[in-house]
Image: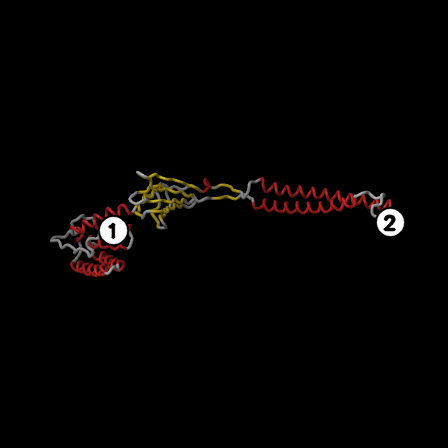
Amino acid sequence: MRSLLVMLVLVVAAAPLRADPQPQPWAVGVTEPQKQKAHQLLEAGNALFLERKYGEALDKYREAIGVWDHPAIRFNIVRCLIFLDKPVEAAENLKLALKYGAAPLEEQVYSEALGYEKLLAKQIGEVVVSCDQGGVALVLDGQPLATCPAKEARRVTPGRHQVVGTKHGFVPRTIDVVVVGGETQQVPVSVVPLEKAARIEHRWAGWKPWVVFGGGLTLSAIGGLVELQAVTNMNAYDRAVSDNCSTSCAPGDPRLPKNLKSTAAVEDKLGISVIAIGGAAAVVGGVMLYMNRAHTVYPSERTQVGVLPMPGGGALTLAGRF
């Protein structure tokens, strides 16, 4: 953008302030000492401008404006802001510089100003924020706007911007705005009461913790039955030994129940393992039940609006979510 704007700078130094035979609107109430002071500051700013010290020149021009708000000085502020890549501020000051038309400016300077006006109109956009709900505080890109009900327009650079509306007891509303140069983006804002937007949420579906907890108890019960069977078999084996082996019985003695002892040992290990697994599952299920308690959620509403450039025009896009 800078290269295009620089091409329009036909006169680098400010044009001299016109000396009118009778007071003009831009000179009403300005004394001769004030005019002289403004001229001195203007010349100091011009010298800095020619040295490409645009920030320092801007300070001098602003100081001069504080003494005498002359359109020619305003226009030099516009030049500095353009070189400093501040198109929005440049456009605002250009509007003030052209407030009285061509009368207070040299012809060449006025033509240059009109060229800037057309170019800046394509380089900046406008956001118009409005709302009807009383008490809603509006913010654009971190800068406070009016409190609703209100409607306020702000010039901005092309790209993404953010509008936020807040009110106590309501869900905050965030709107992401995509602005195109030379376009005006309307942004209506409304907020929803918390009680309407609130919803009850759980970490998991209600049945899941109960399945884990109940499954754990069931496994523990099955393990207990297996362990009980192991004890029963071992007791039966011990009674067979007591009844049939008054002295001693060798392994494989036909008087002893076949495989009863080994079966009891296997059942004992299996039962203990199943009980342990079931107990662990029941503990996990209990923790899940605790963590799955209902809680109220107050979401922050977010919407995106903007213009999507398309061949032959643009398409309005609108998206929202909580």
Q: Disc 1 residue type?
A: Leu
Residue 213 located left or right of residue 197: right
Instruction: Classify residue 260 by image quadrant.
Output: top right
Q: Which residue is drawn at 75% across and 42% down?
A: 229
Q: Mark 2 points at which residue?
A: 248
Q: Residue at x 28, y 55 (%)?
A: 84
Q: Is mark 2 on a helix, strand or loop?
A: loop
Count the marks: how many?
2
Residue 245 located left or right of residue 213: right
Q: Which residue lies furthest to the right in this view?
A: 247
Residue 171 in the image, given as x and y percentages of width and height: 43, 44
Residue 290 located left or right of residue 143: right
Q: Which residue lies furthest to the left in this view?
A: 21
Residue 63 in the image, given as x and y percentages of width and height: 24, 58
Which quadrant of the rendered structure holds the C terminus?
top left
- Which of 137/277 is in front? 277
Q: Mark 1 points at which residue?
A: 5
